[in-house]
Amino acid sequence: MASGNERLEGKKVSENVYLCPDGIYRWVYEFPMVKNPTILITVWKVLLVSCAICLVLVGVPLLFTDGPESLLGLGKGFGAALLVLLPLSILGYLLVAAAYGGKYMVLFEMDETKVRHIQMEKQVKKAQAMGWLTAMAGLAAGNLSAAGSGLLASSKSVSTSVFADVKQVKADRAMHVIRVNQLLEHNQVYANGADFDFVLNYILDRVPEAAGGRKKDA
C-alpha cells in the first residue's frame, strides 16, 4: 500500500527523481554555468567541427588548383580566426551566464521510450520549478494537467532523445552529464550525484546495445 508521501508526491526513486502517476520520471536540475563548463565545451566542439568542415570544403579544391603550399596559408587563416572566436565564445558564455543569474534551470522527463530536456525561462526560480514538479507528481488529474500546461508554457526549448534512435551514450560523472546522442540530435541529460546512477542505468537499459546500451535478457 502506498505511503501518505507517495500518495501526495508520487514515488521518489532517488534524492531528486520522482516516478509520477502517468509513468514518467521527472526531476529538476539547477546547472551552475560558471562552475560546470559543459555547455561551453559543447560550443567549442561545434565551433571546431564547423571550422574543420569549412577547411575541407575550401582546402580540397585549393589542393588541386594551387598545390599543397596553398593549404599552409589557409590553415593559418583558420587558426587566426579560431584565436579570435574562442575568447569571444568565452565572453559570450559569461554574458549569458550573468543574464541567467549564473544558473541554467532544466526539467527532465523520462519514460520507457525517450528522455526530454526542458529548458526553463531564465526568470523561473528553483522553488517554482520544484513546485511544478511536486504538482506533476501528485495524483490529482486536474492538478497534473494544469501543472504540465504551465510548465511547458514557461519552457524555452525542449530536446527529445528517443532511445531506439540513440547512437551513443557517454557519461561524465564529474560534470554530472550523460550525453545521449542521436544522428542529428545531441542531448545532454544532467543529474546530481545521488541521482546519476539511476538515470544512467535507466537509459543504458533502454538504448540499443550498439550505442552503449546493455544486452537485454531473452
Image (cartoon, rainbow, N blue to C red):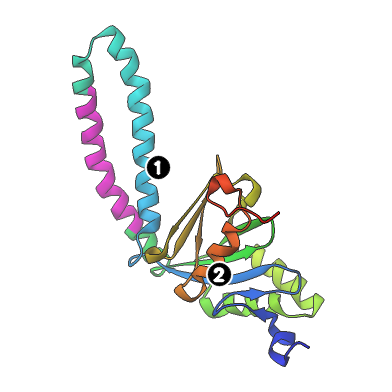
Quadrant holding the N terminus: bottom right
Magenta range is 74-93
Q: From this view, report whether residue 176 is shown above or below residue 15.
A: above
Task: Tell me the amino acid under the disc marked 2.
Answer: Phe
Question: What element does badge 2 sit on?
Answer: helix
Residue 48: x, y in percent? 34, 39
- State whether the magenta stretch is mostly helix, strand or loop: helix
Q: Residue 143's spot in the image, x, y percent? A: 76, 77
Q: Is residue 156 visible?
A: no
Question: How many C-alpha atoms fall within 10 Å of the one at disc 2: few (<14), some, or many (≥20)?
Answer: some
Looking at the image, residue 160 sits to the left or right of residue 47; the answer is right
**Where residue 130 is drawn, which disc sits there?**
none
State the residue in front, 179 or 85: 179
As drawn, the label of residue 46 is 1
Q: Which residue is mark 2?
A: 198
Asked which secondary structure carries label 1, the reply is helix
C-alpha span from label 1 to label 2:
29 Å
Q: Is residue 73 magenta?
A: no
Discs 1/2, front: 2
Q: Which residue is drawn at the image coordinates 34% and 33% (left, top)?
A: 51
Q: Residue 124 placed where, x, y %?
A: 54, 71
Q: Is residue 139 left or right of residue 206?
A: right
Q: On screen, 169 above or below 175?
A: above
Dividing the picture into quarters, in which one does residue 141 lie? bottom right
Residue at horizontal 62 percent and vertical 77 percent from the top: 13
Give the mark nearest the N terminus, 1 or 2: 1
Q: Amino acid at mark 1?
A: Val
Residue farthest to the front? 218
